[in-house]
Amino acid sequence: MTGLAGIRIAPRVDTAELIAFAEDLAAAARAETLPRWRECCPADNKGGNTFDPVTEADREAERVMREMIRARFPDHGVSGEEWSDEPGSSRWSWSLDPVDGTRSFICRLPTWTTLIGLLDEGAPTLGVIDAPALNETYVGTGGEAWLVEGDERTSLRTSGCSRLAEARFSTTDPFLFDDQRGLDRVRRAVRVTRYGHDGYAYARLAAGSLDLVIECGLKPHDYNALIPVIGGAGGHIGDWRGSSDFSAGRVVAAATRELYDEAVALLPA
């Protein structure tokens, strides 16, 4: 089936085993990341002249999740940020970003997340955005989305905002944009702008407290988990051209299709 600006979405996941396993992956990653965040573990630079931090928390959380996938679903593929791709022999594959927002992590800010996506023949069909320091787990299947806080589960729905003039907008870092003219047009058009939240901004969009997120330079492990969560909460996600080609790493997520279209009209092609 097709939706979300033409993105091919696999049939809704209703397999309790896969959903429970994705939540188990998030819990296992927490066990590796949260203590290291509290202890301010050191960071290495994997970006050469441009500082691109990676920590032991990133590496160990992804390693543990990969081990769990191999043990439980040995025919599933795995790709992630820190280790090489492991192709599978089945229709299923996992997309892992153990610490999305490592800069926030090393500054001991609480909004870093773990992103876990499950793809069915390449189409994102289940997503988890876990915020360990906040004890919040956002889960989406494309057809529904919910927030888990301890023993409580709450259904998620976007705000329904359809106009830029009323929108609460977020992007991680405006200085990541090569061409800031479109970003400036959006910033001037919206009601509120907040910076610095990485994957957590998409979680809050799904929860209805943000309305619009625009990013550039994203990789598949950055957005695969987001698509089912945003879609499951009733939002819309696509690229800067009004379609679903994320190959350039340009992503727009919005509370409604109307808001998405209005934002895209201000961005460079």
Image (spheres, helix red, strand yellow):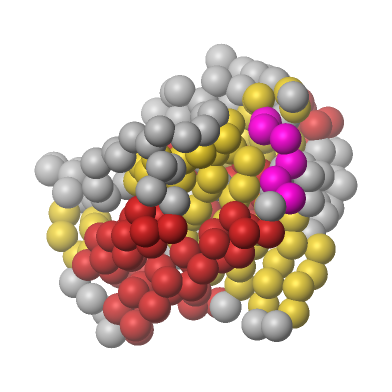
Q: Is most of the magenta stretch helix, strand or loop?
A: loop
Compared to residue 226, the image places residue 110 above or below, namely below
Q: Which of 103 and 229 is in front in this view?
A: 229
Q: In which quarter of the view is residue 130 placed? A: bottom right
Tell me the quarter of the picture where residue 61 sits: bottom left
- Return the residue found at the far top: 269
Stretch in magenta:
9-14
Say whether residue 104 is magenta.
Answer: no
Q: Position of residue 17 (x, y in %)?
A: 62, 59
Residue 97 makes an appearance in the image: no
Which residue occupies 59% across, 55% down?
18
Above or below, 195 against 55 in this view is above
Write the residue at 30% across / 78% down. 36
Whole-percent x and y of residue 59? 25, 60
The residue that appears at 57% across and 35% down in the rendered structure is: 120
Q: Front-most of 103 and 134? A: 134
Picture quarter with the C terminus: top right
Quadrant containing the N terminus in the rendered view: top right
Q: In this view, does 203 lie above or below 31?
A: above
Q: Is residue 12 magenta?
A: yes
